[in-house]
Image (cartoon, grey):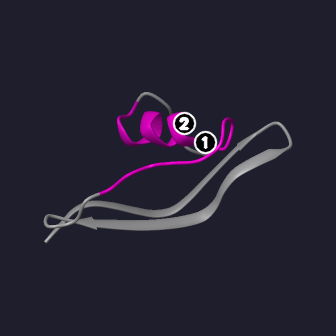
Amino acid sequence: MSVLEVQHLTQQFLDKRLYDDANLQVNKEDHLGITGQNGVGKSTFIKILTGQLEPD
């Protein structure tokens, strides 16, 4: 059973593209971690998922 599904997510700030047609599915039994260097879009991704920011 899917608890989170992201389809065709694209996000860009000025000339920096963070995501380009990203797809993700998280199932009930899955564990999810988000890691990466500063400025790659981790916080932006969380804000999109929680509705604080609208994706492109």
Whether residue 30 is visible here, answered yes or no, is yes
How many discs mark residues in the rendered view? Answer: 2
Identify the element where label 1 is drawn: loop
For the residues marked 1 and 2, what is the alpha-carbon distance in whole angstroms? 5 Å
Residue 47 in magenta stretch: yes
Work out which quarter of the rendered image holds the N terminus and state it.
bottom left
In this view, 3 is above or below 35: below
Residue at position x 66%, y 36% in the image = 38
Q: Are the residues flagged by discs 1 and 2 in contact, CB closer than 8 Å? A: yes
Measuring 14% from the left and 67% from the top, which residue is drawn there?
29
Residue type marked 2: Thr
Identify the disc placed on residue 41. Answer: 1
Disc 2 is placed on an element classified as: helix
Relative depth, front residue between 56 and 45:
45
User: Measured along the vertical axis of the image, is residue 15 above or below residue 22?
Assistant: above
Going by the numbered disc 1, the residue's amino acid type is: Gly
Horizontal and vertical percent position of residue 8 = 53, 65
Which secondary structure type mostly characterizes the magenta part of the structure? Answer: loop
| Residue closer to the observer: 36 or 43 | 36
**Picture coordinates of residue 41 (x, y %)?**
61, 42
Callout 2 environment at 10 Å: few (<14), some (14 to 19), or many (20+)? some
Left or right side of 13 for 46: left
Q: Position of residue 6 (x, y in %)?
A: 40, 60
Neighbor class of circle 1 (other Cα within 10 Å; few <14, some 14-19, many 20+) is some
> Which residue range is magenta in the image?
32-51
Q: Is residue 4 above or below residue 45?
A: below
* Lateral position of residue 34 relative to residue 32, left or right: right
Q: Residue 24 occupies which quadrant of the picture?
A: bottom left
Residue 17, magenta (yes or no) = no
In terms of image quadrants, where is residue 39? top right
| Residue that lies at the very extreme toward the right in this rendered image | 15
Q: Which residue is mark 2?
A: 44
